[in-house]
Image (cartoon, rainbow, N blue to C red):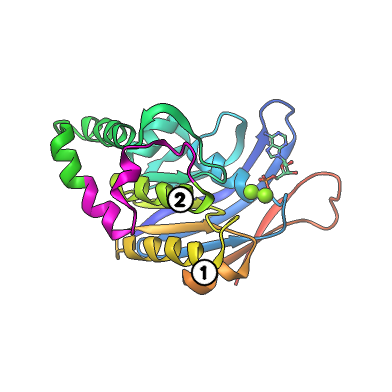
Amino acid sequence: RVLLEVKDLKAVIAESGQEILRGVNLTIYEGEVHAIMGKNGSGKSTLAKVLVGHPDYEVTGGSVIFKGENLLEMEPEERSHAGLFMSFQTPVEIPGVSNFDFLNMAYNAQRKKLGLPELPPLEFYSYVSPKAAAINMDLRFLDRNVNEGFSGGEKKRNEILQLAVLEADLAILDEIDSGLDVDALQDVAKAVNGLLTPNNSVLMITHYQRLLEYIKPSYVHIMYRLPWQTKQHSMQMQTI
Ligand code: ADP
Ligand code: MG
Ligand code: MG
């Protein structure tokens, strides 16, 4: 089954009107892992942010169908509730909010949308702790404030825990390998691989080949700037 179908997607920076994405096409089926590679500044993060509905960008053309629905008509929160997840290149710290409470809130918001009763903390603990264990995360991290003082690797792993809790259908992972040493990278990759099922998919963005050794993609796309337009960014994708 097709999970995501992006057709001729065009997007500009909302503030300046500068065009960044110029007709991106991408089809992802359930159970597939896709990688997008390409030079710094080629528009990879922009594509990811446009897909999750980031307000800095405005879609000016094309279509995005996610699980049979028009993704572009959905609010960012609705996209998340529909099963789209994005890990950010720089995960945010939330002082004063424990990781546990944050995850519980996010999970309950999703359940509410699905018409399910909220999980009280005790039950949520039973839900989240095996997920944390599965990705090799120490349970103490649940009591700490969201990402506060976490190392690079711990932040990335925390993103994967959020993904595991929300059981997203499509996870967009933007440079989860950035700033990680080989050990941390292997840990994070193992966590991601452990979450893969025949029903969910991953879109990973990276400019390092190294990540692809640990998370095996079904397809690799290269994003690039069209050579005859040197001033403006113009993204096209080539699939290998
Ligand atoms: P990548 O993730 O491939 O490194 P980005 O998508 O982050 O590339 O950026 C693509 C281009 O668009 C870059 O030149 C970047 O400076 C520009 N860009 C992206 N977002 C914004 C923004 N909000 N404001 C101004 N320029 C932006
Ligand atoms: Mg970049
Ligand atoms: Mg980027």
Question: Which of the two labelled residues, at mark 1 and mark 2, occupies the earlier sequence position?
Answer: 2
Q: Which residues are magenta?
A: 128-150
Residue at 28% x, 59% y is: 134
Q: Position of residue 178 (x, y in %)?
A: 59, 55
For residue 69, side relative to residue 55 (left or right): left
Q: Which residue is mark 2?
A: 154
Quarter occupied by the C terminus? bottom right
Q: Position of residue 205 (x, y in %)?
A: 56, 56
Looking at the image, how many numbered discs can be counted on the residues? 2
Residue at mark 1 to residue at mark 2: CA–CA distance: 28 Å
For residue 101, side relative to residue 191 (left or right): left
**Amino acid identity at mark 1:** Tyr
114, above or below 163, in the image: above
* Residue 239: numbered disc: none
Quarter occupied by the N terminus? bottom left
Q: Which residue is mark 1?
A: 219
Q: Position of residue 17 (x, y in %)?
A: 73, 30
- Say which of 172 and 66 sits in front: 172
